[in-house]
Image (cartoon, rainbow, N blue to C red):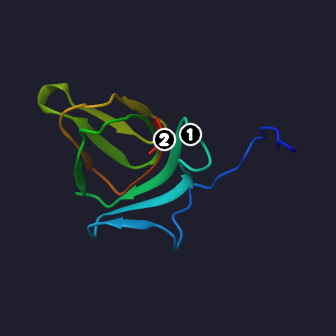
Amino acid sequence: MDVTPPQARRFSSTIGDDAIRFGDRILIAPGLGKEASRSMSAYTSFLYAGAWADLPASYAEIWVVLSGALRVGAGSDAVTVHAGDFVHVPEQTPGVVEAIEDTTMVCVSVPAH
């Protein structure tokens, strides 16, 4: 049986027609899914200013902010991240993510979901 060797893959941070909507304020564009990589997944997300979502998740994520600004966490432990910043969101992190401005970010999750 032939086995395809691992290779680098390119993804775009563009939000296209295949984006999934969460309410009317958050768009998620698929990138690297669980079926392609069992160890991690990656996607691009766009949040309109004022959009928010609960944080607790059963996986850890790294978010790289490409444009805009977010507030992430709970109460006095929340952090603000801007374009060019990245933030680690451990699994079961309490709080919310809120878009301070229209924001585009790339998210990498471990394990894949």
Closer to the camera, 112 or 52?
112
> Mark 2 Cα within 10 Å, few/some/many (few <14, many 20+)?
some
Labels 2 and 1: the sequence-earlier one? 1
**Which of the pair 77/57 is nearer the observer?**
57
How many other residues sit within 10 Å of disc 1, few (<14), some (14-19) or many (≥20)?
Answer: few
In the picture, measured across the screen, residue 105 lies left or right of residue 80, that is right
Image coordinates of residue 18 in percent, x first then y, are 51, 70
Which residue: 23% across, 51% down? 53
Q: Which residue is mark 2?
A: 112
Dot label at residue 38: 1
Query: What type is the residue that disc 1 sits on?
Result: Arg
Taking the image as shown, residue 28 lies to the left or right of residue 12, namely left
- Above or below residue 5? Residue 32 is below
Image-quadrant location for residue 72: top left
Residue at position x 35%, y 36% in the image: 81
Please tell me the numbered disc located at residue 77. Answer: none
